[in-house]
């Protein structure tokens, strides 16, 4: 789609110029959450540009807390991975590791970068740090520290690519530096172009009373003369079209194959377009038609998914009663068809609705969603469900039930590797659980949970233990 291709082309063009123009110190890439991962990949791959001679290192840690120490540790780890790859390609780098004297300060992080530049050998010159913080806790401090890093005289061999998703904290800094020292490229999807793309893809809107099954492509054949219509003669080697029984034997719905699938696609695209254009009533109607069509096409899983989307649309239209009915229908259909993932999503929707009205049934729905997620072997989703169940129980002053839910979530989190755990709310669960245990006098276990939470969030061990009383 052109709406996505345009910002990526701009990013590639400006990134290529940044690779050539070594005097430019900073490339700022404001983007959307939907394009964040793609923008990170595009910027990281600029390392392979023919005019580039620097080593690219990517850091996505949140900018907050003990960020300097965490950044230094993450940089050293990533630098070691890069060095090993270069060594296999025949390029040796000098020995490099984090000096024990470097403290958890901005100057310590700068010292780590400076020493890394010193161990580089030809043909490598300098380092380009691709910063894409997953979270910025203090915007003013974030800008101030980057201003200091970019201007540091000892870091002239370090260049910066900063990717911001759904924020524009560095806009003022880029203007301060001017075009001679800083570039910016908007890697955002153009809404008007995306709507045009959707309209082209959607084609004509199916009529309300159109059949789910369109005419078969092998219709009657008419001769040029006065001969009556007849079936076309079979081509040499042509096989007869599959029968409905053959399609079902291969797991396909005859109605879907013979045109229902195309109608479903058009309904979905027109619904997405209506939502983009703010026509929420039309979007709800089209989504309901899509869900009903999935039922006629014998697509149980897809029907549940469309019912879940329909519930979201109805919530956006301030119709919680209709949304609750959609989620209940989805949950029951998922139970009948043994679809644990979709069942978990439906239970989450119901839990959210009940929690908004502070009904105790919310806890049952959250717990059901967690158990279904575990059954579907979706550990990350199960962790989130247990966290929400525990938080709701805590709000209802059912602390023992909250501890039980958080313990189940934490037990699941301990089975994940570091990167997978960091992508979940495992650290939050550990902190919440630690608070409850500390209040009950389990100080040692609470300290251990705080330590594990820090390790998950930052990837490094915390500094000296805070006093726990």
Image (cartoon, rainbow, N blue to C red):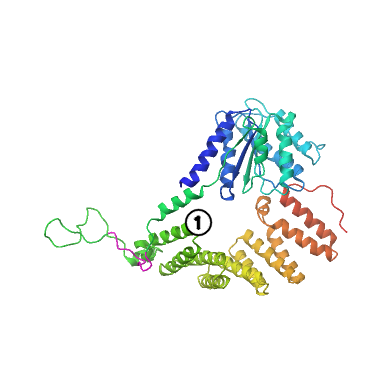
Q: Which residue is mark 1?
A: 276
Write the start and end of the magenta stretch as one range: 207-217
* Residue 418 in sight in this render: yes
Most common secondary structure along the magenta stretch: loop
Residue situated in front as seen by the camera: 227 or 289: 289
Residue 103 position in % (x across, y down): 81, 39
Q: Is residue 54 above or below residue 39?
A: above
Give how far across and how far down residue 217 sits, in percent: 29, 59
Mark 1 neighbour class, 10 Å CA radius: few under 14, some 14 to 19, many 20 or more: some
Q: Residue at x 71, y 38 (%)?
A: 146
**Residue 220: x percent and y percent?**
22, 61
Q: Is residue 118 above or below residue 261?
A: above
Determine the residue positioned at 48% across, 49% down.
192
Task: In this rendered view, identify the residue nearer to me: 242 or 314.
Answer: 314
Q: Is residue 245 magenta?
A: no
Side of 441 where 413 appears, left or right:
left
User: Of 298 and 11, which appears nearest the observer?
Assistant: 11
């Amino acid at each position: 789609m052109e709406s996505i291709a345009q910002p990526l082309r701009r990013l590639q063009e400006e990134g290529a110029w940044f690779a050539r123009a070594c005097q430019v110190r900073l490339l700022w890439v404001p983007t959307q959450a939907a394009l964040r991962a793609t923008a990170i990949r595009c910027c990281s791959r600029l390392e392979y540009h023919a005019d580039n001679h620097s080593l690219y290192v990517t850091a996505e840690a949140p900018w907050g807390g003990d960020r300097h120490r965490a950044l230094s540790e993450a940089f050293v780890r990533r630098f070691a991975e890069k060095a090993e790859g270069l060594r296999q390609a025949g390029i040796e780098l000098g020995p490099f590791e984090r000096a024990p004297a470097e403290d958890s300060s901005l100057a310590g992080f700068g010292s780590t970068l400076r020493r890394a530049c010193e161990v580089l050998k030809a043909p490598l010159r300098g380092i380009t740090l691709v910063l894409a913080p997953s979270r910025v806790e203090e915007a003013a401090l974030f800008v101030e520290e980057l201003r200091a890093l970019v201007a540091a005289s000892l870091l002239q061999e370090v260049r910066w690519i900063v990717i911001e998703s759904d924020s524009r904290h560095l806009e003022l800094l880029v203007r301060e530096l001017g075009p001679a020292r800083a570039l910016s490229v908007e890697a955002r999807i153009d809404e008007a172009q995306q709507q045009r793309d959707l309209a082209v893809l959607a084609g004509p809107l199916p009529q309300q009373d159109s059949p789910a099954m369109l005419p078969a492509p092998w219709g009657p054949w008419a001769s040029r003369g006065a001969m009556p219509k007849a079936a076309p003669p079979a081509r040499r080697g042509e096989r007869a079209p599959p029968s409905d029984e053959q399609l079902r034997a291969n797991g396909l719905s005859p109605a879907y194959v013979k045109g229902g699938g195309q109608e479903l696609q058009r309904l979905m695209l027109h619904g997405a377009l209506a939502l983009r254009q703010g026509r929420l009533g039309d979007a709800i109607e089209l989504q309901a038609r899509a869900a009903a069509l999935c039922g006629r096409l014998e697509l149980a899983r897809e029907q549940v998914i469309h019912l879940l989307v329909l519930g979201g649309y109805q919530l956006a239209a301030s119709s919680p009663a209709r949304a609750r009915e959609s989620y209940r229908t989805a949950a029951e259909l998922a139970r009948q068809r043994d679809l644990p993932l979709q069942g978990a999503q439906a239970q989450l929707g119901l839990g959210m609705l009940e929690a908004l009205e502070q009904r105790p049934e919310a806890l049952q729905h959250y717990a059901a969603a967690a158990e279904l997620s575990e059954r579907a072997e979706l550990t990350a989703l199960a962790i989130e469900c247990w966290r929400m169940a525990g938080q709701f129980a805590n709000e209802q002053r059912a602390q023992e039930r909250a501890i039980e839910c958080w313990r189940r979530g934490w037990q699941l989190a301990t089975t994940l590797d570091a990167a997978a755990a960091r992508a979940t709310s495992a650290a939050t669960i550990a902190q919440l659980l630690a608070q409850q245990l500390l209040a009950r006098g389990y100080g040692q276990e609470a300290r251990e949970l705080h330590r594990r939470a820090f390790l998950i969030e930052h990837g490094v061990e915390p500094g000296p233990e805070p006093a726990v009383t």
